[in-house]
Image: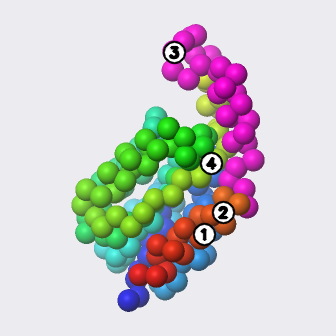
Amino acid sequence: MSHNTLVAYSSLTGNTKMVAGRIYEIIEGNKKLISLNDIKEIDINQFDRIVVGFWVDKGTADKRTREFIKKLSQKEIAYFGTLGAAPDSEHGEKVKERVTTLCSEKNEFLGGFLCRGKIDPKLVEKMGKFPLKLVHPLTPERLKRIEDAKPHPNEKDFQEAEEYFKNILNKR
């Protein structure tokens, strides 16, 4: 069966946009790539399958992405997201649970993929100004995670995203 697939993404630092482009390249059939900033320019009803990309904010998809997903109904849906933490960390697993639940509410959920991405330097600067022991203090562990995330997404991340989406999309 041929699908009309929309790859829609929200990107703060460019990480998610890069991953979106790589996923878009491997999708077969009719397809469109668009930023959620421009989503009002297209008719969502012409797509039966949506691949939505987001950056992680407060343990879930960013607000723009959550609002977009909530508007979708009776679509095949998959997601990909970028975050500063390791995707297989406790934080990453909670993000997957939250976004999977959101995607599954009114749609047929196909799968979800997370990869690491560099953290917005403005956010890191803001973290440094938080009063001690409040949200996200810059502990040595957090500083190491931020440093470890800087080279991501990298070619290995892109290849893993491509392979994941080849497996869940192009075989349907």
Q: Residue 50: image x %, image y %?
A: 40, 68
- Quarter holding residue 16: bottom right
Side of 39 where 17 appears, left or right: right
State the CA–CA distance, disc 2 to disc 1: 6 Å
Q: Which dot marks residue 116?
A: 4
Name the residue carrying label 1: 162
Q: Do tag 4 and tag 2 residues touch (Cβ < 8 Å)?
A: no
Residue 118 rendering spot, x and y as whole percentages: 67, 43
- In the picture, the quarter occupied by the N terminus is bottom left
Where 170 falls versus 57 (above or below)?
below
Location of residue 151 with respect to 44 vertically, above or below: above
- The crowding category of the residue bearing disc 2, from other C-alpha atoms within 10 Å (few below 14, some 14 to 19, many at least 20), is some
Amino acid type of the residue tagged 2 in the rendering: Phe
Q: Secondary structure at mark 3?
A: loop
Q: How far apart are labels 3 and 1 at the CA level?
A: 38 Å
Can residue 146 be found in the magenta stretch?
A: yes
Q: Which residue is mark 3?
A: 134
